[in-house]
Amino acid sequence: MLTKEGRQLVNTPGASYPVFFSVVTGFSLSNIFLLVRMPCHNQQLNNVSSGQEHPMKQVRFANSSSSVPAVVSNSEPSDATTTQSVSQDSLGPQLKLLPLNDQIRELQTIIRDKTTSRGDFVFCADRLIRLVVEEGLNQLPYSECTVTTPTGYKYEGVKFERGNCGVSIMRSGEAMEQGLRDCCRSIRIGKILIQSDEETQKAKVYYAKFPPDVYRRKVLLMYPILSTGNTVIEAVRVLIEHGVQPKHIILLSLFSTPHGAKSIIQEFPDITILTTEVHPVAPTHFGQRYFGTD
């Protein structure tokens, strides 16, 4: 059978897509070109129809009231996933984890790999930072609003409420500043410089600069690696001294140890911690690798 374009339709047994022969008048059989149309993106592939699907992983937030299990998989959970679930349940709703998927797992793996080049490290770190910042913004208050579209239609939506700011704990926290600015162009960002004493390991504040009205704002506190938690605890104390309530502080982090998260929440039960992974071993080389000083 010939189609309107002069192509002959051939029904191939077992094929999930049509095969066309382009027929050109005056050419021999050896000059006939075979045109194969690949499956569309919404067509089911053979391996899907046969039940060979990629296992799906889901990790709920710690404060979720859903009955969905922490991990849904047809295989045994990994050590990192198990650690996340246990830590969430034990630390309560103050600890929030990004829903785990293969994209996040790959970024975490590349960042932890000692053979990763600095270019790939920074690229993957920036991607992971952006995901954490986006979810951190979801924790901030929004208000309903109505806008008019170019066609005159009234659309019921939401808008971001003013009165927020970012605070980075120098130096590794500065790696997260650009990700926040990419999402909020005009947001104000303060800085805290805290260093630990080499002998006592006690954190000491050397510098702190915030917006003048920081006490009236919601604060996104940025620090990528939570190891002991001492640095963050000292930073939160400084913010409290400037009038910020712990319940208005959202800590954005990439990696956390169970000890670090527990120490912060025990000291400040009202603070919110948002991270991608809770694991006994944190990539403490992050700051040096990101800024090229390793």
Image (spheres, helix red, strand yellow):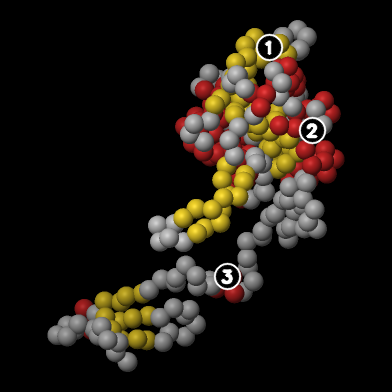
Give whichever of discs 2 and 1 has the lower sequence position.
1
Q: Circle 3: is it few (<14), some (14-19), or many (20+) Cα within 10 Å? A: few
Q: CA distance from mark 2 to mark 3?
A: 48 Å
Determine whether the residue tagged by mark 1 lies in a helix, strand or loop: strand
In the picture of the structure, the residue carrying the numbered disc 3 is 47
Question: CB under 8 Å between callouts 2 and 1?
Answer: no
Question: CB under 8 Å between callouts 2 and 3?
Answer: no
Determine whether the residue tagged by mark 2 lies in a helix, strand or loop: loop
Front tag of 2 and 3: 2
Q: Position of residue 200 (x, y in %)?
A: 78, 9
Q: Position of residue 243 (x, y in %)?
A: 71, 21
Determine whether the residue tagged by mark 3 lies in a helix, strand or loop: helix
Q: Amino acid at mark 3?
A: Asn
Residue 205: mark: 1
Q: Circle 1: is it few (<14), some (14-19), or many (20+) Cα within 10 Å? A: some
Residue at the spot 56% in from the left edge and 30% down from the top edge: 176
User: Is residue 287 something that shows in the picture?
Assistant: no
Residue at the spot 51% in from the left edge and 22% down from the top edge: 292
In the foreground, 230 or 121: 230
**In which quarter of the view is residue 22 placed?**
bottom left
Give whichever of discs 2 and 3 has the lower sequence position.
3
